[in-house]
Amino acid sequence: MIAADFRVCLDACVLANHGVADLFLRLAERPRMYSPVLSRQILDEVRRVHVDRLGWPGELAEFFQREVSGAFAEAIVEDYEGLIRIVTNDEGDRHVLAAAIKGKAQLIVTFNLKHFREQDLKPWGIASCHPQDYLITLFEFKPEVVASKLYEIAAEQDQTPQKRLAKLARTLPRFAGTVAEAMGWTLEEEP
């Protein structure tokens, strides 16, 4: 489950959460801890969430799209649409499973685990995992890499790593707790 060539399909719900996406995408940069799998349809869904639900200005949403597409061009799979008709998971997320199959992903990371039931994934040799569970696995494997990415993100946002982790704790409480305990950190509360 941990190797630079281990292929992980990131669902739109993971990429739409900027704090979570930032950490996941940095862990996929070279030297990477895993290889991401994406599709234009997943990225389009992220854009809709950013603009329609989160109120991002269109320019910011487009910037995010360009950055992800440019940095991870090799991760974007195509020609998976035929698989959408034959997969059996939740209808709204069949495109994600189809992209995962085409991209030879072994794992789908998603907050919507109910849309990716084991019986729908098993025939394809794919599993699903909550983002914090996969981040905990990555941290347990290489704590220094995950911690260095947290330091990097915090520095860019003029924060302490503890404060950055406290923000992630809102969405990823077990991951934040695991890291804080291992690092001997007290999570800084928001003012």
Image (cartoon, grey):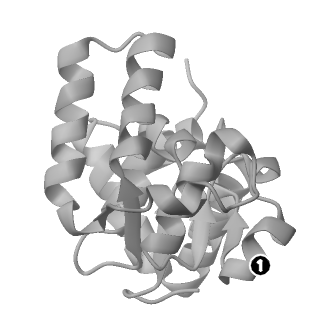
Query: Relative to residue 1, is residue 52 drawn left or right?
Result: left
**Residue name at image x 43 percent, y 58 percent:** 24
In-image side of 137 versus 29 (left or right)? right
Q: Outermost residue toward the right? A: 119
Callout count: 1
The amino acid on which the numbered mark 1 sits, given as a three-letter code, is Lys
- Residue at 22% x, 69% y is 74
**Label 1 element class:** helix
Quadrant containing the N terminus is bottom right
Position of residue 13 in the picture relative to residue 24 (left or right) = right
x and y, in percent, of residue 130 in the image = 70, 58
Q: Nearer the viewer, residue 67 or 83?
A: 83
**Disc 1 crowd, CA 10 A, few/some/many (<14, 14-19, 20+):** few
- Measuring from the top left, give residue 123's x and y in whole percent: 74, 80
Q: Which residue is mark 1?
A: 122
Residue 47 locus on image (x, y percent) = 36, 28
Task: Specify whether residue 41 is in view.
Answer: yes
Q: Which of the two residues, 157 or 1, is positioned nearer the viewer here?
A: 1
Specify whether 126 is left or right of 27.
right
- Name the quadrant of the C terminus: top right
x%, y% of residue 118?
Answer: 83, 69
24 in relation to 107, above or below:
above
Q: In this orientation, which residue lies closer to the viewer: 178 or 128?
A: 128
Foreground pick, 91 / 149 = 91
Which residue shows up at 17% across the image and 45% down it? 67
Is residue 186 among the parts visible in the rendering? Answer: no
| Residue depicted at 60% across the width and 73% down the height | 107
